[in-house]
Structures are given as structure tokens and as C-alpha cells.
Image (cartoon, coloured by chain):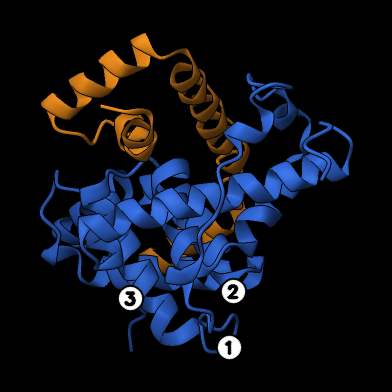
Chain colours: A blue, B orange
Amino acid sequence: MTSQPPSPPPPDAEQKRASFEREALAHLDTLYRVGLRLAGNAADAEDLVQETMLRAYRSWAQYTPGTNAKGWLLTILRNLFINEYRRRTRHPETVDVDTIEPYAVFPEVQDEDPQATFFDRIVDDEVLRALDDLPEVFREAVMLSDVEGLRYEEIAKVLDVPVGTVKSRLFRGRRILQARLYDYAVSMGYIKGHTT
Amino acid sequence: MNCRECVEHLYEYLDRELTTDLEREIRAHLADCPPCGEHHDFEVVFLKFLHARCSAQGAPLALRRRILEQLFDE
């Protein structure tokens, strides 16, 4: 019995790996950030991202090079999260998010701090906490748009909703987030706010 | 274009997701209406702040390494 030396991978496997590293792995930070905000803890986020990359690699033939790899990967991540992770981590909202009518912060600060310098005093952890407190449908829209820079059309594809829904979720999600950060800033004394 | 309509479309304007015509109307209104102009600037600050504070964190190096190893096993 002869022991075989490890054979080098065939050239097409090599090529596949190289193109995957170049086009998919380049978005690892995005996947991790979104995964973390969805799953709510680092261990689940890492598992979720690793599994996403494995699935993406196995179906890499279905991806057209040069098209929107970020959106394609985020769609895999999100579906995986919904089907396999959400059950054991967070639960989908039971509140009817469509009834949430957030107020606008700008009129509250217009006189005292129209340049919104109070935002600068809020620490990162508090911002992330506020983001985590958003109902999931708003949180994912805000993440994809404001943190990861996707266009409405791309977000609509990832979330599998019409563009109009993306628009309204962004509008309300941003306002809820703003209001929450404003309340925090007032409670910390960073801004006086309106005393009622 | 009145103030209410302007504020309603402000995010789409900032996201550059409006039609050329509507974008032009909003831009004209913002130039003519100081309160809406200030509101616009406030939202710009907020969106920049949000992006800066939430995009700092990247994937752990150990995760990247694990994924690369996993691909080599495939």
C-alpha cells in the first residue's frame, strides 16, 4: 500500500476559490455586522456568517460574476437567519409595527441645538443598543441602508418586499431611532430638551 | 411644494432615490425655506453619525480564518 502525497487542488477549484475570495469574502465585515444585529450575540452571528459563506461557496456557480455579490450574500444570510436561527435567538415581533407613528426629533431641538451636536456625545454602545431595540423590520432596513449603503432597490430584493415598503420602514425606523437617542441624550443631560 | 411634502420626501432626497423632477422641486424648496434647510442639515448629521457609529466593527480575524479553512476542505 502506497501512501499518497496530498494532491494539489485541480485548477478550476483553485479558480473558484480565488474568485470567491475576491468577490464574496470581501463582504465579510458587512455580513458579520448585519448578522450580529440580527442574531443579537457574537457566537450566533459567527455561526450564521460561517454557514452563509459555506452555502454561498457551494452555490457559487449560480452567482454571475460582477453582479451584486453583497446583496446576494445578504439574501442568503437573512433567509438562513429566519429559517434556522430566529427560533432559538430572538422572536419575531408580536407588535403591529405598522401602527407605530414616531415623532420627528428636529422640531424638538430646532432652537437649542439645530446642528445636532448632542449626537456626538452619545457613545457607540448606546447607539448599537438603540438599533437593537428597533423592531426587526426597521432594524434590518436601517442596517442595510444606513450602515451598509444599499440602494432601496437592493434592500427590497434582500428583504423580499416592494420598494415602497423599504421607503416607509426606513422613514419610521430612522425616526424611532432618532427619538430614542434624543430621549437618551436628554436623560444624560447632553441636551435640555423640552420640559413638559 | 410645501414644508410638509418636503419633510415627507427628505430621506428619499438624501438617499438620492427621487425622480429628477421631484428632486429639483425639493432642492428649490430647501433653498427658499430656512427651517426646512435646517431640518435637512440635521438629518444629514444624523445619517452620517449613524453610519460612523455602526460601521466601525468588522468580522473577527478568527472567523475569517475559520471560513478560509472551511473553503479549503470543500
Q: Which residue is mark 3?
A: A4
* Mark nearer the viewer, 3 or 2: 2
Question: Label 2 sits on what residue type?
Answer: Asp
The image quadrant of residue A81 is bottom left
The image quadrant of residue A191 is top right
* Mark nearer the viewer, 3 or 1: 1
| Gap in angstroms between the C-alphas marked 1 and 2 | 10 Å
Circle 2: element type: helix
Q: Chain of mark 2?
A: A
| Between discs 3 and 1, the one toward the N terminus | 3
| Position of the N terminus of chain A by quadrant | bottom left
**Residue A116 x %, y %:** 66, 25
Circle 1: element type: loop
* Mark nearer the viewer, 1 or 2: 1
Q: Are marks 3 and 1 on the same chain?
A: yes
Q: Chain of mark 3?
A: A
Instruction: Work out whether residue A129 or residue A29 is closer to the camera in this orientation and state it.
Output: A129
Q: Would you call the spot at circle 2 few (<14 residues within 10 Å), some (14-19), or many (20 or more)?
A: some
Q: Are marks 1 and 2 in contact (CB under 8 Å)?
A: yes
Q: Which residue is mark 2?
A: A44
Q: Chain of mark 1?
A: A
**Residue A89 x %, y %:** 60, 82
Q: Would you call the spot at circle 1 few (<14 residues within 10 Å), some (14-19), or many (20 or more)?
A: few
| Position of the C terminus of chain A by quadrant | top right
Q: Which residue is mark 1?
A: A88
Question: Label 3 sits on what residue type?
Answer: Gln
